[in-house]
Amino acid sequence: TKYCEKQDWWSTVGWDEDKTEEENKEEVLKVQEELKYLSILSIHHLFGGMAMTLGYLTNSPTIFAHAVLVEVADDVHDSLVLLLRWWPFNGKDTSKLIMYMLPHHMFGLLISFPMILNGWHKNVNAMAIGSALLMAGGITLAVHTIQ
């Protein structure tokens, strides 16, 4: 975020000519927080996806399982931040976001432990699918952040 804060566009990101200066100040702060949060999510998904891809490419179920556990930690963290309205939500209403993100995280948690405990993480097809899904999320978030 330090890099972004040094850019000329940072102070006016989200600026709308049709709004008052006060409304724009609030909107700019909101968009800045969203960009910070999306950047963090993007980095996490890309890191997890690359770790899963490494496990897949080297045919290492151990590396893949570690990457799955990294994803589990993020699912728990994201869910807590959302439910408890911690940063970046800071007490704001998150009910709509909860309807989208909580099922997403719950499905990830529900599949992760059975995958490892039942040995499914040794299946090359499961590794390919998991890698592709997490990398797709990371790339989507990165592109959305950059836009």
Image (spheres, helix red, strand yellow):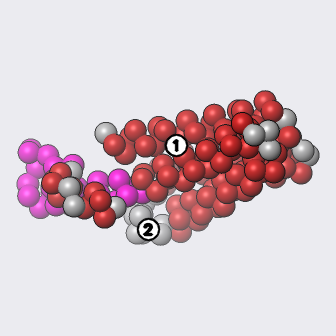
The kind of residue tagged 2 is Trp
Q: Is residue 36 magenta?
A: yes
Q: Looking at the picture, how far across and down is residue 134, in whole percent?
A: 61, 41
Residue at point 43% right, 43% down? 142
Q: Looking at the picture, how far across and down is residue 29, in whole percent?
A: 25, 61
Secondary structure under badge 2?
loop
Q: Residues within 10 Å of mark 1 (few under 14, many from 20)?
A: many
Look at the picture and state if 81 lies above or below 114: below
Look at the picture and state if 129 lies above or below 114: above
Main SS of the magenta part reads helix
**Would residue 19 be found to the left or right of residue 102 on screen?**
left
Q: Looking at the picture, how far across and down is residue 2, in whole percent?
A: 31, 64
The kind of residue tagged 1 is Gly
Residue at point 61% right, 58% down? 74
Outermost residue, top direction? 125
**Would residue 48 be found to the left or right of residue 15 on screen?**
right
Q: Which residues are magenta?
A: 14-37
Residue at point 63% right, 34% down? 132
Viewer-proximal residue among 13 and 55: 55
Viewer-proximal residue among 114 and 25: 114
Q: Which mark is residue 31?
A: none
Viewer-proximal residue among 142 and 91: 142
Q: Residues within 10 Å of mark 2 (few under 14, many from 20)?
A: few
Task: Confirm whether residue 110 shows in the render.
Answer: no
**Quadrant in which residue 60 is drawn:** top right
Image quadrant holding the N terminus, namely bottom left
Look at the picture and state if 13 lies above or below 89: above
Residue receiving disc 2: 87
Q: Which mark is residue 138?
A: 1
Outermost residue, front direction? 58
Secondary structure under badge 1?
helix
